[in-house]
Amino acid sequence: MANYLFLRGNRNKKFFLDVAKELSFKGHKSFQLKFELGELLFKSPITSIFAPSKISSKKYPITDEELRELPIYNITYKQRILKKKTSTKELQLYKRYMYFIDQFIADHQIDIICLFNGYHWIDQITKVIANKRGLRTYYFEDGLFRPFTITCDPNGINADASVPRDPDFYDGLEVDSTRLQQFLHKPETLSAQASAKENLVKVAAVKAVSMFGSLLGIHPKFYAHITFWQAVKYFIYKKYFQYKKPDQTTLPDEYIFLPFQVSRDTQIFYNSPNISNMEELLDHVYKAVRSFNQKNGRNLQVIVKEHPEDISRNNYKDLKKRYRDKKEIIFVKKYDINKLITDSLAVVTINSTVGIESIAKHKPVITLGDAFYNIDGVVHHCDTPNQLDDYILKAINTTLNINRINKFIYYIRFHYQLEGSINRTDKQTSANVAARIDSTSLVKEF
C-alpha cells in the first residue's frame, strides 16, 4: 500500500478528492495540501492541511539562482510579459513553502505525488523535492480528446510527455479499426453528463473566494498572470462567447489553417524555441505563403482563428490593422473548427491540440515548436521558420502515411489517454484514474 499526496488541483477542486477517495477503497492512504481559500469550500474525505496556516520562517536549502532556472510560470511571466524580475522576497516565500512541503512528505512517508499541469511554482518546488527523494510523480492536465479524456503522465505534459517518438513503435502496434472509428470522437464508457462542459459560474465563484483570500492576506497571491478585474473580464466574455453567432466568412479555395494558441501559455513559454508570440507566428506564415505563391504560381491564403481562451486578454488590434490589406490573411473568431481543418490544404501550428485534431482527420500538419507528436510520418516538423515555404510544398505534395497516423492516434486515444472528465464529478473518471496510478496495479507504464 502507498501514501499519496495531492497538491493544487485544477479548476474542479473535487477532482483530486474523488481520485483519493477511490484510492482509499484500494487500501491506500491519501493526503491533500490546500493552498487557496476557495479550496476550503470543499469537504475532504482525506486528511487535508491548509498549507498557508502552517508555513514557518524556515527555508529549504536552495539558492535563488536554482529557483530562477526552474520553469516556473510566475517567474517566466513576469520576465517575458511584465518585464520584471521576481523579487528576492518572493523567492524566499517559495523556499518557506518548499521547507514545509518537504517536511510534510517526510513526516507522512509520502510515496507518490499528484500534480496538475506542473508549471506553477508549487508544482516545480515539489518536483525538486520529489526528484531528490526518489518519489514517483504524476502530472494531470485536460485531455487531448476533450472533454472526455484526461492526461495523466509520470513525466509531464506536452513536450515532456512520455509518448514514444520512435516511428517503429507505432508501426508495430495492433489497431482495432472498429474501436477507432466508433470511439475516437466520443466516450466509450463515460456518461454524457460527465463529459459535459464545466460549470463556469461555479469555477468563477471559487476563484473569486481565493482572490479574496489573497487580498486579505490569508494566503499569498499564487498567480502573477491574472488580476481580479482580468478574471471578471474573462468570465463575462466567456459567457458572452457562448451565444456569439459564428463568423460569416466564405472560405477560399486554397488555404492554410493557422490556429492561434494562448499567447501566454506554457506551450509558448517553454516549448516554442523559435517563436515567442502569435504576432511572430503570423509573420512567419505570411512570409512563407507569399514565397510559396510566388514560386509555385498559386493563390494560397491563410485562415487565422483566434483562440477563445485568449480573446478577452488580447484582441490583436494592431496585428489585424497591420494585415488589413493583405489579401492572403483572413481572421475569424468563431467558426466551425472541424470545417476549417477539413477544407484546408494543411494545418500549421506551433504545438497545439488542434494539431492532434488535424492529424486524426488525415490532414497534413506542420509544427513549428516542440510537440510530443513531432514524429516522422505523422507530422512535418519545421524547426527553421525561414524555410516554412518549403515545408508547405512538401506537406501538400507528400502522400500521408495513413497507417502510421492511425496507429499513433489509436495509441494516444486508447492507451495513453485516460477516459474521464476533469470538469465534472464522475465515478468512472475517478476509478479510471485510480487504476492508472495504483502502485499495486499491473497497468503498464508508458
Image (tube, rainbow, N blue to C red):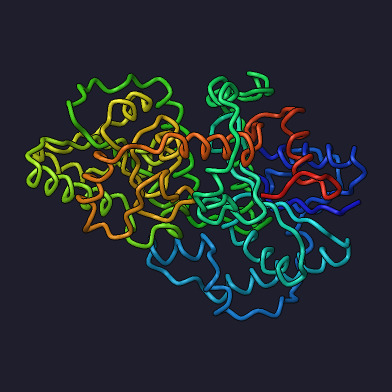
Residue name at image x 17 percent, y 26 percent? 253
Q: Image check: 387 left or right of 10?
A: left
Residue placed at 82% from the left, 68% from the top? 103
Indicate the position of residue 189 as horizontal and vertical percent values.
69, 23
The residue at 60%/62% (across/down) is 121
Q: Quadrant of residue 242?
A: top left
Residue 60 lies left or right of residue 166; in this view the side is right
Q: Position of residue 179 (x, y in %)?
A: 60, 23
Residue 204: x and y, percent?
57, 36
The number of numbered discs placed on residues in the rendered structure image is 0
Residue 360 left/right relative to 347: right
Residue 43 x %, y %: 81, 38
Between 402 and 313, the residue placed more toward the observer is 402
The part of the image, by quadrant, that contains residue 11 is top right
- Whether 411 is drawn above or below 376: the answer is above
Q: Nearer the viewer, residue 86 or 269?
A: 269
Q: Residue at x 46, y 38 (%)?
A: 405
Which residue is at the front of the view, 214 or 105?
A: 105
